[in-house]
Image: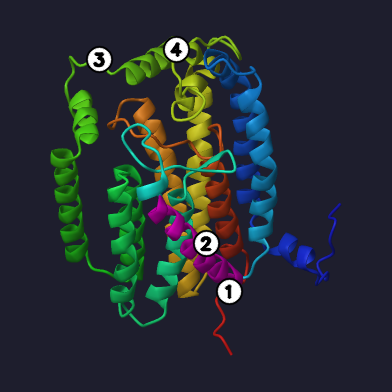
Amino acid sequence: MNAFARTDRSLLGQWWWTVDRFLLIGIGLLILFGIIMVLASSPPIARNLKLDQMHFVIKHFTVLVPTALGLFGVSLLAPRGVLRLAVGVLALFAVLTLATLWLAPEIKGAHRWLFIGGQQLQPSEFMKPALAVVTAWLLASRPGLGGLPAALLLVGPTVALLLLQPDLGMATVVVAFFSIQLFVAGLGWLPIIILGGAGVAGLWGAYQLLPHVRDRVDGFLDPTAEVYQVERALSAVQSGGLFGRGPGEGVVKFRLPEAHSDFVFATVAEEFGIIICLVLVAVFCALVLRALWRTQLNPNRFVQLAATGLVAQFGLQALINMAVNLNLVPTKGMTLPFISYGGSSLLAVALTMGMLLALTRRGARLEPVP
């Protein structure tokens, strides 16, 4: 029996009858499986770091509460509210991301994390979803591609800022989802090909100028090179077989310091097997396809562009994480949405999917300001 009647005009009543429940269920399944994986993978890593074995579990649950509340709260917003939230988030976290260039300590060759109140924060994670919404508004504000110059004035400095940290992976994701938005906005194939060529040139420049990028690419391309993390991840995938070694029976979490975050997909493969990995891939694919289907049903140009950008970055993040675990692309520190142990990434993914849920609600449209 439904908790709300169809005639219920309250905020919760309208949300219940307009939100996409398929997306809600898919997100819920990912969150639940993420809890299982944090419980299974993080205690050995905490012991190796001489922490209480439940350290990461407790921190994950602590972040999970604001994650769930934030996701739900953002999904209640109308498109105008989503836009206002995105503008505020982008302004705040752009300043914090800029501050990382001077205030953030160097970790793994990059300056990406600030320590505020004893908590580690990666501000650039929150810029991604906010940027997708704001660029969508700029592109939709004028017919055709009239809003492109204004959008480029926003995206260009953002990518430059990410490269200064340096964070090539996130810069690539930003360029990718913005290119997808441009294609949806009406950009022709020739400019898309030119943009692709410019992207390849940019990656080549990063390979030449950034030593850590060169090391990762060389390790990926050289079949004789031994890349410890990738070798352990592939070994875990192979040892898991079709049905896995069983929950808690994996060994990769004792050997990989990031088996609960960047390499959690390898932990899933080892303990639960390839079958469950394929189910997990199917859930991610279903969420992306469902969101795109809901998006194309909406005639509002802002909603189409914003939702496309959000779902593109969600899908790309999942794809890159799984590809790294399977040694299909060079190593990149990127979490698996809702599955990896979370901090900034978990909260940022919740913001992304909360905005997506709000924009894919039935009848969502950006009304003109009176």
Is 79 left, or right, of 252 in this rendering?
Answer: right
Q: Position of residue 163 (x, y in %)?
A: 28, 49
Q: Nearer the viewer, mark 1 or mark 4?
A: 4
Q: Which residue is mark 1?
A: 80
Verify whether residue 73 appears in magenta.
Answer: no
Q: Position of residue 52 (x, y in %)?
A: 64, 18
Start and end of the magenta stretch? 79-99
Whole-angstrom CA distance, mark 2 to mark 4, is 37 Å
Q: Amino acid at mark 2?
A: Val
Verify whether residue 95 appears in magenta.
Answer: yes
Q: Earlier in the sequence, mark 4 or mark 3?
A: 3
Is 130 left, or right, of 213 in this rendering?
Answer: right
Q: Earlier in the sequence, mark 1 or mark 4?
A: 1
Q: Which residue is mark 4?
A: 255
Q: Which residue is mark 3?
A: 226
Q: Nearer the viewer, mark 2 or mark 1?
A: 2
Whole-angstrom CA distance, mark 2 to mark 1, is 14 Å
Q: Which residue is mark 2?
A: 89
Whole-angstrom CA distance, mark 1 to mark 4, is 48 Å
Q: Residues within 10 Å of mark 4 (few under 14, many from 20)?
A: some
